[in-house]
Image: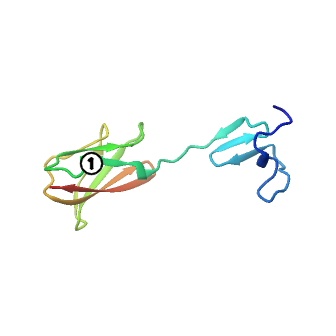
Amino acid sequence: MPGQHCFPFLLNDYGYSPRLSTTTNIGAIEFDLDCMPVSSETIQLSTSTIDLYPNPCYSCRSFFVRNLPEDNQYTYDIFSSMSTLITSGKIEGNQIMLSTNLPAGIYFVVIHGDGFSAVRRIVVF
């Protein structure tokens, strides 16, 4: 409604001075004084939600990756616990396919995407 403000803090800036602009940016969403969205920003991927399964696994030859956004290409590197590169490749269909089974041990999988990388530990029995 014109003349009424759904968020009183839209009237003043952080120093409690009257705003000079009719818009304000609150986090990822920008509002005008009538509380109508003006624009939004792209929210970046949180790498903390990326998960590999099965983990732990027995004699694994493939892993599935959960929570990767669609429409991007991803690669992976698998390192031993001694920091030796074991294998690398592309993640296709949210799946990491290996040419041979990984021997028992602890491994670190580095997932590379558009502007980010995430590291996950996997345990093989």
Amino acid identity at mark 1:
Gly
Residue in front for this viewpoint, 123 or 77? 123
Q: How is the image coloured?
A: rainbow
Quarter where residue 40 is shown: top right
| Residue plotted at (22% across, 56% down) | 123
- 84 left or right of 40? left
The quadrant of the rendering that contains the N terminus is top right
> Callout 1: few (<14), some (14-19), or many (20+) C-alpha neighbours within 10 Å?
some
Q: Position of residue 30 (x, y in %)?
A: 69, 43
Judge whether 54 appears above or below 70 on screen. below
The quadrant of the rendering that contains the C terminus is bottom left
Q: Position of residue 6 (x, y in %)?
A: 76, 39
Q: Secondary structure at mark 1?
A: strand
Quarter where residue 92 is shown: top left
- 20 left or right of 48? right
| Residue plotted at (31% across, 37% down) | 93
Q: Position of residue 77 (x, y in %)?
A: 28, 55
Q: Position of residue 62 (x, y in %)?
A: 21, 44
Residue indicated by mark 1:
89
- 6 left or right of 76? right
Q: How many marks?
A: 1
Judge whether 36 appears above or below 124 on screen. above
Residue in front for this viewpoint, 111 or 3? 3
Judge whether 65 appears above or below 123 on screen. above
| Residue plotted at (15% across, 46% down) | 99
Q: Residue furthest top?
A: 1
